[in-house]
Image (tube, rainbow, N blue to C red):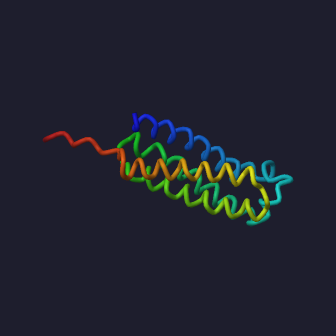
Amino acid sequence: MMNKLLWVLQILTALLYGSSGVMNVFMFEKVSHGLAFFGAMPRQGWAALGIFELTCAVGLAAPAAFHWRPQFTGVAGALLAVECLAFVWLYMNYHEMTLVLVSVVLGLIMAFVAYGRMVVKPIVRPLDPPN
């Protein structure tokens, strides 16, 4: 049951962070219009953050799915949890309380995924077949 829950959370958050990364990299002008907190960093900073989110989105599912370095899944979750903490601080500075709440919830989900994949239900590589 725990494995299925972690997979659902990994896939859903990978889609969420993947779309966020795409928007930060390729649609910045469109998504940043009228939102003051986008002024906290230059355009290049948001693009770098988008690339980071895209990388972590892939890291949430691909390593575990292909049994290649599955520990990266937990690392991606932990990194995104830390990112959420940074966004809580950013959004609080701009008095965006709804986004603070969203970041807290996402941060807790990502911490749960990281802990789940590192400690509770890690993905293990199947044994290599004998020669």
Q: Residue at x 70, y 54 (%)?
A: 100
- In the rendered image, residue 48, in percent from the top left (x then y), is placed at 64, 61
- In the rendered image, residue 33, in percent from the top left (x then y), is placed at 84, 52
Q: Residue at x 77, y 55 (%)?
A: 96
Q: Residue furthest right?
A: 34
Asked whether 119 or 17 is in front, the reply is: 119
> Quick check: 72 left or right of 21?
left
- In the rendered image, residue 123, in percent from the top left (x then y), is placed at 35, 44
Quadrant occupied by the C terminus: top left
> Quick check: 29 left or right of 111?
right
Count up the numbered dots. Answer: 0
Q: Residue at x 86, y 53 (%)?
A: 34
Asked whether 99 or 42 is in front, the reply is: 99
- In the rendered image, residue 97, in percent from the top left (x then y), is placed at 75, 54
Q: Quadrant of residue 13?
A: top right
Q: Quadrant of residue 2?
A: top left
Q: Residue at x 55, y 55 (%)?
A: 80
For residue 37, above or below residue 26: below
For residue 72, above or below residue 121: below
Quadrant occupied by the N terminus: top left
> Quick check: 93 left or right of 125?
right
For residue 32, above or below residue 39: above
